[in-house]
Image: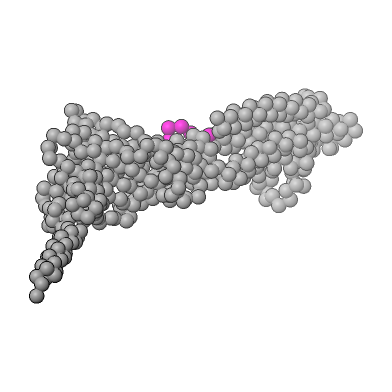
Amino acid sequence: MDPGPTMSTLRLLCALALMGGVCGAQDSNCSYPALLSLLNLGERSAALAETRPVKNFTKTTSVMVDMLLNGILEVDEKKQTFTCFVTASTSWDSDILQWRPKEVCGLRRISIQREKLWIPDIVILEDIGNSGVSIYNQYALVFHFGLLQVVDRYELTTACRMDLYRFPFDTQICSITFQSVLNTVHEVRLRSYFNQSTMNHHTREVFTSLGEWELVGINITVEQYNIGLTAWDQLKYMIILERRPLLYVINLVIPITFLLVLDVASFCISEARGEKLGFKVTILLSISVLLLILQDILPSTGDRLPLMAFYCSVIFTLTGLSLLETMVVSLLVNLDDCVEKDMDALETGDLAESQKEVENCEDPGRQGEPARAVDISLETKENEPNISGGDAHRRMTLQKLLISIFKPGKKKPRYYKEVAKKIDIVYFCLYFIFVIAFMAYTFNEWVH
């Protein structure tokens, strides 16, 4: 038997066995338990879970917090709160959890339960809600070069100090501030991995809210909060929001401006018909309804009165003054009618009618004076036939008192009408000029 082939066969079998052993060893190193054993993460390690992952405790740990704004849920102006949905990624360096990928079949990252690792104690300072984390990720991602990362999604309700001076053309800035509770700047430094432009680009890609508010951008700043000799890093995301004013313009600004225009146009209504007074009262009541609607929107406290509230209040005041002016003009017109009727009675020699005018227009206690006026309550009785006897008596008494004060008998006919006309013209000119100046000032403040 030739020993040559036998030896060759044995050598081949030995080589195959050796290759199989090597491959088996490589397969055993490619398992997750092998990597966990290599990193000493088979069981919970106090050195990894309870202390910062540094070999020298004097070294600071760099923690990077990146936030994406997914959507705006609610902005409450009265409560001064801002509710949103965000995704926060927290990353930090570890000097302990590192390995060479070639030792574990090229594996570059692995997911590990958070309870086995040290997690930075990062909180959001403005958070006033009790909802907390909406989607809590139980695992942390560990990279071979010593970077750890956790990603959480939050439904946040934060306090936001709002300036409603330019409402509804306002822009609000709401901040979300991240800070470590216990670790000072000597232990933990907060940073953002992405720069501001990259963060805004990614946020606009995931932002899905299409409500009342439009996202203008997000500014990122790093500040320090100091108490005595101790300082903490604060990573602040300032969310800039701009209100879409179309709904408020249609429901508030246009109606109240139209009511002001109607009040100005009401000066063209004749005083003789008696409709002008009722028209202005209707306008005043309509503005009151709009003020009640505005009260439900704006907060009760603030550093400055919102322009919208100032705008409505001034228009309400102007309409009220216009109503008072109309009442004065109406009184003067009625007094002039009283004088004309008195003069007609004297010219025709109708002493009985003249005596009747005296009884209705003069003070009953004054005897022996000539007739001076007529009873202007006759026209009132025709316009208001349902007035009770007591109301008619009180109205007549008031008219007599006013007529006795103004003493119409001593004035010429149409004197009070001329006075009323001059008052109406002067007041209309001043009113119109003030309205134009006020509207220009208000809209200039709103726009700029």
The image quarter containing residue 134 is: bottom left
Q: Position of residue 142 (x, y in %)?
A: 23, 50
In the rendered structure, does residue 417 fall within the stretch colored magenta? no
Q: Position of residue 4 (x, y in %)?
A: 11, 68
Residue occupying the point 26% across, 34% down: 233
In this picture the colour scheme is one colour
- Residue stretch in magenta: 300-307
Residue 298 seen in the figure:
no
- Closer-to-camera residue (316/331): 316
User: How many numbered markers are drawn?
Assistant: 0
Quadrant of the image containing the C terminus: top right
Quadrant of the image containing the N terminus: bottom left
Residue occupying the point 40% across, 41% down: 199
- Closer-to-camera residue (203/21): 21
Asked if 227 appears above or below 148 in the picture, the reply is above
Q: Position of residue 276 (x, y in %)?
A: 72, 40
- Closer-to-camera residue (326/58): 58
The image quarter containing residue 258 is: top right
Residue occupying the point 13% across, 70% down: 5
The image quarter containing residue 367 is: top right
Residue 82 seen in the figure:
yes
Q: Determine the residue located farthest toward the front in the rendered image.
A: 2
Residue occupying the point 57% across, 37% down: 312
Asked if 94 appears above or below 42 in the picture, the reply is above
